[in-house]
Image: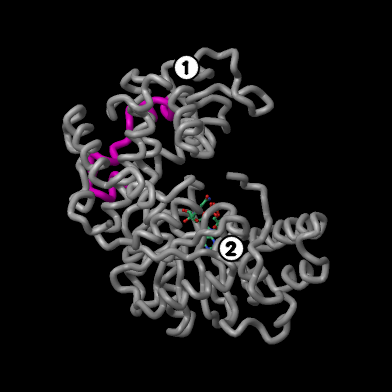
Amino acid sequence: MDTDVTEPDRPRRDPADDEDEGSPFGPVGVVGAGAMGAGIAQVAATAGHAVTLVDAAAGAAAAAVERIGASLSRLVEKGRLSADDATAVRRRITPAEALDELPHCGLVIEAVPEDLDLKRRIFAELADLQPPTTVLATNTSSIDIDDIAHEVTDPERVLGLHFFNPPPVMKLVEVVHGERTARAFVEHAAALMAAWGKTPVRCSSTPGFIVNRVARPFYGEAQRIVESGIADAATVDWILREKGGFPMGPLELTDFIGQDVNLAVGTSVWEQTGRDERYAPTAFQRSLVEAGRLGRKSGRGVYTYAADGSVDDSVDGSEPDVELAERLVGGPVATDPLARTLAMLVNEAVDLVARGEASADDVDTAMRLGTRYPKGPIEWGREIGFDVVARQVAELDDAYPGGRYRPSPALTDGSLR
Ligand SMILES: NC(=O)c1ccc[n+]([C@@H]2O[C@H](COP(=O)([O-])OP(=O)(O)OC[C@H]3O[C@@H](n4cnc5c(N)ncnc54)[C@H](O)[C@@H]3O)[C@@H](O)[C@H]2O)c1
């Protein structure tokens, strides 16, 4: 995923329309002016809102506004935004250093570091400062919405708006409801995201929400296949790319994301599901992180990288064994990296839908937009046949007993046909 692209989503209204009167939804507050907060502020201002961007670190919000200005200028240079619109968008964003500098907002989005105590404190303060109609949203990737809303007296207005990185480019926003979030606020927030040119999907506050939950087997199965010596990393990546149509293989993707970051997300889902065996981190990935092999950013992860960022192909194991790949694909599911990965992706997605955490359409949309999978997993399941997937997962369970491979009952109960 390119983190330096700042092509904005096209707003449905002219950003210059309401420079003076403000958007009908009212001002937007963004708390935390880091990578995500600055991007979200840019998106909101581009959609016409007056935005106040708050960061507790002295000068951080002002510096973020400068960065947003530079990113808007690049869009002007590329002919994607007029100079006047860029100026108007930039002028709508006001930097601030404390929550009490926020005006009364229609929506406040929090994007401070992933720390429950910090987020709880901010939400308690925001709930006191903002009127009861203000939607209070968190951009958390992994913390339960009800936990964040714990000290808010009216938690029905607290929800998740999980943007993907970088927010001006990525279309997907997971609109996450806690147990106490009111439906009306969810619909209101989803409609607003659509008006910002985003594609909202709704889900409950389940560990990992949709994308970070359903994607777990994409990484985990590849790691286990390499760990057990069925195929080397380059061959597994080749199979998922060339035979599966995924834009990147799972092992090269974790090098790109950062092995430490990917392990932290996986571990968080594992912990939050009561250490469900299905999400248990692999020894393979743990040992990479322990050895400081964090991926591209450290020059070495699963692969070794040359100074220009390309894979160093003088290192053994960087080239796929295509002959082996052709033998494995279409063979027994336990040793077929593609069938095994798809079966587990479908199983995970079906489970999420069957538990009522998200709709089948939203799961497919989320995976296509959030991870760029070539197809949604439910659509894939229909193509493969849910009964075939059920047999494949059962076969995996026979080959690797211990609870990791549990066919979802919804694969065979007919509910998803
Ligand atoms: N980076 C990603 O790819 C990504 C993607 C989706 C969601 N998220 C989530 O978004 C949130 C922010 O992530 P990020 O990568 O932008 O973090 P970041 O570290 O880049 O930025 C966080 C900012 O919050 C500020 N901050 C800290 N305490 C504050 C306080 N009390 N009041 C106001 N500002 C404060 C910091 O000074 C910093 O500028 C996290 O919850 C993260 O899980 C991140």
Assess mark 2: CB under 8 A from ligand 1? no
Is 305 one of the magenta-colored residues?
Answer: no
> Which residue position holds label 1?
321
Amino acid type at image mark 2: Ile
Amino acid type at image mark 1: Asp
* Comes first in the chain, label 2 or label 1: 2
Judge whether 88 appears above or below 112 on screen.
Answer: below
Left or right of 334? Residue 161 is right
Q: Where is residue 117 drawn, in percent x and y?
A: 38, 59
The disc placed on residue 40 is 2
Query: What segment carries the magenta color?
Result: 269-290
Q: CA distance from mark 2 to mark 1?
A: 43 Å
Judge whether 192 appears above or below 302 on screen.
Answer: below
- Where disc 1 sits, the SS reads loop
> 123 or 387, which is in the foreground?
387
The disc placed on residue 236 is none
Determine the main secondary structure of the stretch shown in magenta. Answer: helix
